[in-house]
Image (cartoon, helix red, strand yellow):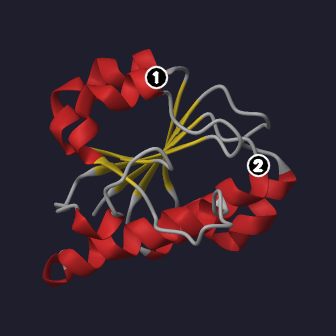
Amino acid sequence: MFNVVLLCPQIPQNTGSIGRLCVNTNCKLHIIKPTCFEISDKMVKRAGLDYWKFLDLKIWESLDEFLSVYVKDLKRFFFATTKSEKPYFKARYKKGDFLFFGGESTGLPMEFMKKNWDNAVTIPMGKNGRSLNQAMAVGIVLYDAIRQNFEEF
């Protein structure tokens, strides 16, 4: 239904939880290296439980490799970031869109997001909040995209 893209993920438990979420929502998971762990890491699979074997997973060696295949879809890239003022629920998602999430401590590169800044979205937080757990952020944005396209789900 949707493509969840993790750029340089750092915490294996988050990636495992996101993989489990992708199986349950019929989404493809793209992981763009480098990662701070091995995809076969037991922590990834522990968080993903027995769902991992059902995951539609593509691992990319670099962002350039990913873009060499999907650059034509740039208009359908959505970037989750704390640097945007646009709430995620104001975006209009379509089946097949790419939802990008950066590394837990690094986020997404600004230069990359500027390729389609109109699709940079944020999750509103209180004044004391800086960021959310990556798996939680993916769930929030992904389920709004599903809500908007529920008839096709």
Task: Please tell me in which quadrant of the rendered image residue 45 appears.
Answer: bottom right
Q: Is residue 87 left or right of residue 90?
A: right
Give the crowd class for mark 1: few <14, some 14-19, many >=20 residues within 10 Å. Answer: some
Image quadrant occupied by the C terminus? bottom left
| Label 2 secondary element | loop
Q: Position of residue 88 (x, y in %)?
A: 34, 63
Which numbered disc covers residue 76?
A: none
Task: Please tell me in which quadrant of the rendered image residue 20 appears.
Answer: bottom right
> Which three-letter amino acid code belongs to the residue tagged 1?
Leu
Whether residue 153 can be seen here: no
Residue beneath disc 2: 11
Q: Is residue 151 left or right of residue 2?
A: left
> Which three-letter amino acid code belongs to the residue tagged 2?
Ile
* Up/down of 30 relative to 144, above or below: above
Disc 2/disc 1 C-alpha distance (Å):
19 Å
Image quadrant occupied by the N terminus? bottom left
Give the crowd class for mark 2: few <14, some 14-19, many >=20 residues within 10 Å. Answer: some
Whether residue 108 can be seen here: yes
Which numbered disc covers residue 63?
A: 1
Residue at 61% of width from left, 27% of height from top? 33
Nearer the observer, 66 or 101: 101
Q: Position of residue 135 (x, y in %)?
A: 61, 63
* Up/down of 22 relative to 103, above or below: below
Toward the right, the furthest residue is 42
